[in-house]
Amino acid sequence: MDEPRAAAVPLTRAQRVLAGVGGLFFAGLAGLGGYGSFASVRDVAEPWFGGQAWIVPAGVDLGILALVSVALLLEWLAMPMPALRWMAFAFTAATVWLNVSAAHGDVTGMVMHAAMPVLFITFIEAVRHAIRRRAGIAAGIVREGIPLARWLLAPFSTFRLWRRMVLWQITSYPHALTAEQRRRHALALLDAHYGRKWKSRAPADVVWMLRDGVMLDQALVRVTELTAPQPEPVDEAPPAKEPAPKEPAPRKPAARAPSEKPPRRPAPRGVATDNEARALAILDAEPGITGAELARRLDISSRQGQRLLSRLTKPAPTHTS
């Protein structure tokens, strides 16, 4: 299930005005910080650089501004380079150290010299966070946090949810919750269908997809097919019976030779079934038919056909006076 990518909301007019005011304050802070530390760092570097000592504070401050500007630009383009930030921090730390050294061990002077560089770095980190957040939202790589209340109420299941968000780049917390609900529904269906040992009875690929929370669309389709109730078999309609042939008109019995078989005993009136009536008609037309052929004609088993043939062709008992 593809996650919908969130779009960064444009800044309102009030937000743009506030950002502009913050930028002006930042420029003033950077200017005052540079001006305040310039003389201190120059005095510290003068024993080594002499008349060129001004190069040290100017180069350090310009280097910090250059590194910070490029780092913010790359964050805006969703191509962050952590090394630039680290170098900016290193130069800022060097500036703080040089300013603190100019205080010659006085605690008050050390705090005053370190205050403005620390404010400068704090402001830069706030701007970087805002740029990175908006660029990440637009690129779909910023992962939303899980509320603290869920961590407290269900720490173990929340950890598994967070783990799947990290492993499979799920950035939306509501989307992750929906996927987790669908996954648990599929697990409940498998448990009801296969029982407690469903992991060993269900297909291995379905178990893997549900265990790791991946390819849930395909997994849910498979689970629905596996757990759907099977339709009851519908009995096929019996084949239409062939109409019994019209019985021929009764004929006078002809005198039979001594070698001829005695006439068959007809079934009693009112007792003969439909199969018997059809069998009598077939025997009248084909006296020498076999039991198997009679069974095939009547659509019954061979054994039933043989019994029916034997019963219908059995000679009628003779009564002696």
Image (tube, helix red, strand yellow):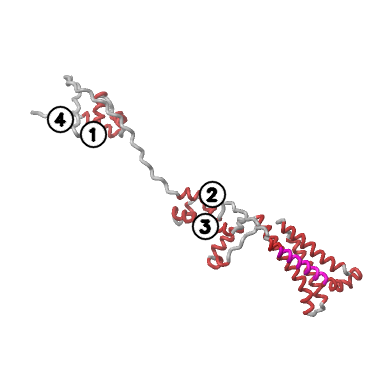
Element under disc 2 = helix
Quick one: 48 or 41, which is closer to the camera?
Answer: 41
Q: Quadrant of residue 69?
A: bottom right
CA separation, marks 4 and 3?
Answer: 82 Å
**Residue 20 included in the magenta stretch of the image:** yes
Q: What amino acid is found at the position of numbered circle 4 in the picture?
A: Pro
Where in the figure is residue 266, as x and y percent of width and height? 19, 29
CA separation, marks 4 and 1?
Answer: 22 Å
Q: What amino acid is found at the position of numbered circle 2 in the picture?
A: Gln
Camera-near label (4 vs 1) is: 1
Q: Are marks 2 and 3 in contact (CB under 8 Å)?
A: no
Q: Earlier in the sequence, mark 1 or mark 2?
A: 2
Judging by the rendered image, the residue that carries numbered circle 3 is: 181
CA separation, marks 1 and 2?
Answer: 58 Å
Is residue 140 shown above or below 29? above
Q: What amino acid is found at the position of numbered circle 1 in the picture?
A: Thr
**Can residue 292 be seen in this snapshot?**
no
Q: Earlier in the sequence, mark 3 or mark 1?
A: 3
Judging by the rendered image, the residue that carries numbered circle 1 is: 273
Residue range of the region highlighted in magenta in the rendering: 17-35
Element under disc 4 = loop
Q: What amino acid is found at the position of numbered circle 3 in the picture?
A: Gln
Judging by the rendered image, the residue that carries numbered circle 4 is: 317
In the drawing, does residue 36 fall left or right of residue 128? right
